[in-house]
Image (cartoon, coloured by chain):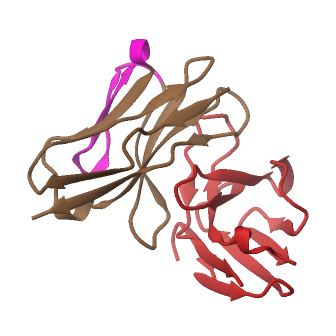
Chain colours: A red, B brown
Amino acid sequence: ETGVTQTPRHLVMGMTNKKSLKCEQHLGHNAMYWYKQSAKKPLELMFVYSLEERVENNSVPSRFSPECPNSSHLFLHLHTLQPEDSALYLCASSQAIAGGRDTQYFGPGTRLTVL
Amino acid sequence: AQSVTQPDIHITVSEGASLELRCNYSYGATPYLFWYVQSPGQGLQLLLKYFSGDTLVQGIKGFEAEFKRSQSSFNLRKPSVHWSDAAEYFCAVGPNTGNQFYFGTGTSLTVIP
């Protein structure tokens, strides 16, 4: 595997389910990100981790819970979601958090549908 | 407040024709500017980026972009479009410090034979 991988690629869940999204980066990077991509809206930064420590949490509802056990893996735990949470969830990584200079590399995303 | 505007939601061009996708930004300092492309079912791939120096930036797949400070613009261009260029294109602004990137809403490109 190369680059940034995400599993599953598609997920359908009910509002009472608990599920997790997984992201793995094979680039030796130290920073990882979760974004939400909704139709016709800008990408929304949800969480940022640097060296496994959360450094950004952009007012994301508590029904989304991130976890970064090491610098290569990032999870997004989901519970009691709402239909408006249906979106494409993108994971990204970068060498470090160096402001805008640091290029982010994106995974293919998980298409989430909440029924 | 920082923001990125892509005025064109959707553009259709003929294969072989030239292309220009518009991007305007609002940012308090000299920004770091990016163009990404997203093919169906894929994540975002970096096309090019501007940090400083020459205002005309060359990227992958034959794309280039020009930074115009006076117009707060960073338009993406390609002289001859290929059918495989059909995708969604996103302009983004990166911060001088921190990690809050701002993305536009994207421009969807259709290429007709």
Q: Is residue B53 left or right of residue A85?
A: left
Picture residue at 63% right of the left edge, 56% below the top: A93
Picture residue at 81% right of the left edge, 75% below the top: A81
Estimate the x, y position of residue A90 in percent, counting from the top left: 61, 64
Estimate the x, y position of residue B62 in percent, counting from the top left: 22, 46
Estimate the x, y position of residue B64 in percent, counting from the top left: 28, 37
Estimate the x, y position of residue B113 in percent, counting from the top left: 9, 65
Q: Nearer the viewer, residue A95 or A85?
A: A85
Task: Assign the N terminus of chain B to one quadrant of the image.
Answer: top right
For residue A71, what is the image quadrant?
bottom right
Picture residue at 32% right of the left edge, 33% below the top: B65
What number of labels is visible?
A: 0
Picture residue at 70% right of the left edge, 56% below the top: A33
Magenta range: B52-71
Tell which residue pokes out farthest to the top in this image: B70
Residue B21 higher or lower than A40, as above or below: above
Q: Nearer the viewer, residue A47 or B72?
A: B72
For residue B14, what is the image quadrant?
bottom left
Q: Is residue A37 magenta?
A: no
Q: Nearer the viewer, residue B25 or B80?
A: B25
Q: Is residue A115 left or right of residue A108?
A: right
